[in-house]
Amino acid sequence: MKGKFLTLEGTEGAGKSTNLAFIETWLKQRGIEVITTREPGGTEIGEAVREILLDKAYTQMHEDTELLLMFAARAQHLQEKILPALAQGKWVVSDRFTDATYAYQGAARGIAFERIAEIENWVQKGTFPDTTFVFDLPIEVGMARVASRGGQTDRFEQERHDFFEKVRNAYLKRAAQTPERYQVLDASQPLESVQAQIEARLQTLLETA
Ligand code: Z5A
């Protein structure tokens, strides 16, 4: 049996990392073999590319360079980690994937979606997530959460508010276009309520696996 591929998306502080751990535990408790991963990153090469992408010293990075680095990391991620795991029947849960490219490099940076789709088709060759959870919340709520967590900001976190509004709207639009693949969660709700919605979707996925 081929495993399922789940992805988590949203603006910063939406709760992706927190719920990645929740999903992993939930699936393991039901005997599912699961690996968790993230983008950009997930492999040794991908994590090295991530460092370049998030380094705020690189203020001069062109948006095409950013786009190609995202897909370079993703190509390695797919070939080295995601596809072998799915072929072994494992479930793969990734903190971000190509929806982030459409939202950040497409809607927010302004690269044409058709250009992104071309590279997506070349790199992914028909591999798409089975389900994508979109953690949706007002930008300022997410920012406040991240601020209270502390730590350094990265190159993306230095963008202005309207950049993140474009990202948020792009996710909602993509979810509305293919509702069967996406589950939009109101991530401003308490964690227990967000996780109850995730659990309901996981249950359905298990029943159809
Ligand atoms: N990027 C891109 O441009 N193009 C691409 O193709 C890809 C990525 C793949 C790195 O991503 C950057 O890469 C990202 C987009 C770009 N930049 N931005 N912005 P990242 O995923 O590593 O970075 P992030 O989105 O900034 O992650 P984050 O700030 O860690 O957010 P999170 O994982 O969604 O949140 P969290 O750590 O789970 O939660 C934040 C805090 O809120 C934490 O203290 C939690 O305990 C708390 N929390 C979580 N849920 C709740 C609820 N429901 N109530 C109250 N408090 C909560």
Image (cartoon, rainbow, N blue to C red):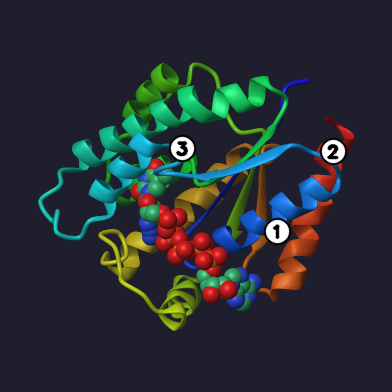
Q: Residue at x 31, y 34 (%)?
A: 112
Callout 2: helix, strand or loop?
helix
**Residue at position x 33%, y 69% from top?**
161
Q: Which residue is mark 3?
A: 98
Task: Report if the CB atoms under discs 2 and 1 are less than 8 Å apart.
Answer: no
State how far apart marks 2 and 1 are (Cα). 16 Å
Image x and y of residue 46, in percent: 36, 38
100 is higher (above) or lower (below) than 13: above
Q: Is residue 14 visible?
A: no
Q: For the residue with label 3, is its CB less than 8 Å from the closest atom of ligand 1?
A: yes
In the visual, does 62 lie left or right of 71?
Answer: left
Q: Quadrant location of the C terminus? A: top right
Residue named by callout 1: 22
Instruction: Give me the disc on residue 155.
Output: none
Disc 3 + disc 1, Cβ < 8 Å: no
Query: CA gap, disc 3 to disc 1?
Result: 22 Å
> Label 2, on which residue?
206
Question: Mark 2 or 1 closer to N-term?
Answer: 1
Q: Which tag, 3 or 1, sits closer to the chain's start? A: 1
Q: Amino acid at mark 1?
A: Phe
Report if the beta carbon of the residue with label 2 is closer than 8 angstroms to ligand 1. no
Q: Amino acid at mark 3?
A: Thr
Q: Residue at x 52, y 29 (%)?
A: 81
Badge 2 crowding class, 10 Å Cα cut-off, few under 14, some 14 to 19, many 20 or more, is: few
